[in-house]
Amino acid sequence: MLGTLTTRPPARIEVPASDQVQNQELDSLRMAHLKTESVLKGLGIYFLLGAAAFFVAGTVHLTEVIRQIQQGSSEFFSLTVAGILMVALPAFMIQTGIKLRKLCPSAKKQATIMGILGLALYPLGSILNLVVLFLIDSPKAEVVLSKGYSFVIEQTPHVKSPSSRVPIGVAVSIGIISATPLAAELIANSAMPL
């Protein structure tokens, strides 16, 4: 029975020449920007890990604020404002990270703001956020984070980055290793009174 069945190749869909040219242009545009896509999505992970570090530091700081309040500290206002900022800032970082992972055009402004704020985290944060600002303001990032580039992604789902096949465990390990010094610095600084 199986020997009598014939397998036919699927019918080839003919695309008009103008559409073929447009598809080739979209393919080449996407191929030229695949590395930038991967880098921007990696920055999204950086912001998500940074949000986790800030949340831990903010929680430690708020614990210190509660202890200071119970002891009758006169620095209640400054400690409370700093604690609230260290807990609220991760929400903005999470939003920025998610938008970068989705390559949303509005992520550019948010990442620039976060990069500028991150320059204050001397020395490691300054270096990392200089790199963030450099990458976000690069000409290729301008293209990838433009409104029209989402159309290019929709039209070229078959174009994949070879680096997107990196095991998730390796990427998470690298992220944790790079975020650990930042988290330690934040926790150490948050325990000191303002």
Image (cartoon, rainbow, N blue to C red):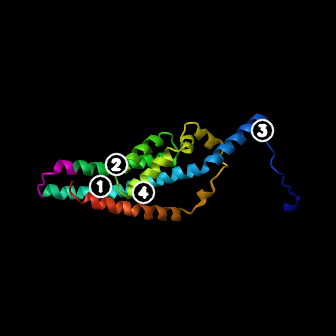
Give the alpha-carbon distance from disc 4 to disc 2, as whole Å: 13 Å
Whole-percent x, y for residue 72 in the image: 11, 55
Q: What's the residue at 57%, 41% (across, down)? A: 143
Q: Is residue 76 inside the magenta stretch?
A: yes
Residue 23 image-quadrant placement: top right
**Quadrant location of residue 185?**
bottom left
Which of pointers 1 and 2 lies earlier in the amino acid sequence? 1
**Mark drawn on residue 46:** none
Q: Which residue is mark 1?
A: 58
Q: Indicate which disc, 3 or 1, sits on the residue closer to the N terminus.
A: 3
Q: Disc 2 marks which residue?
A: 89
Q: Is there CB contact under 8 Å for labels 2 and 3?
A: no
Q: How far across and down, in percent of the image, does residue 34 sit?
A: 61, 50
At horizontal 64% and vertical 52% (from top left) the residue drawn is 160
* Direction from residue 20 to residue 39 in the image, left or right: left
Q: Amino acid at mark 1?
A: Gly
Which dot, 4 or 3, sits closer to the camera?
4
Give the crowd class for mark 3: few <14, some 14-19, many >=20 residues within 10 Å. Answer: few
Asked if the magenta segment contains residue 77, the reply would be: yes
Kind of residue at badge 2: Leu
Q: Secondary structure at mark 4?
A: helix
Q: First in sequence, mark 2 or 3: give its number.
A: 3
The stretch in magenta equals 71-79
Instruction: Kindly check if marks 4 and 1 are in contact, taking CB atoms under 8 A apart as contact.
Output: no
From the image, tell me which residue sits under label 3. Answer: 15
Determine which of the numbered discs, if any, sits on residue 49 in the image: 4
Instruction: Where is residue 157? Give x, y as percent.
Output: 65, 47
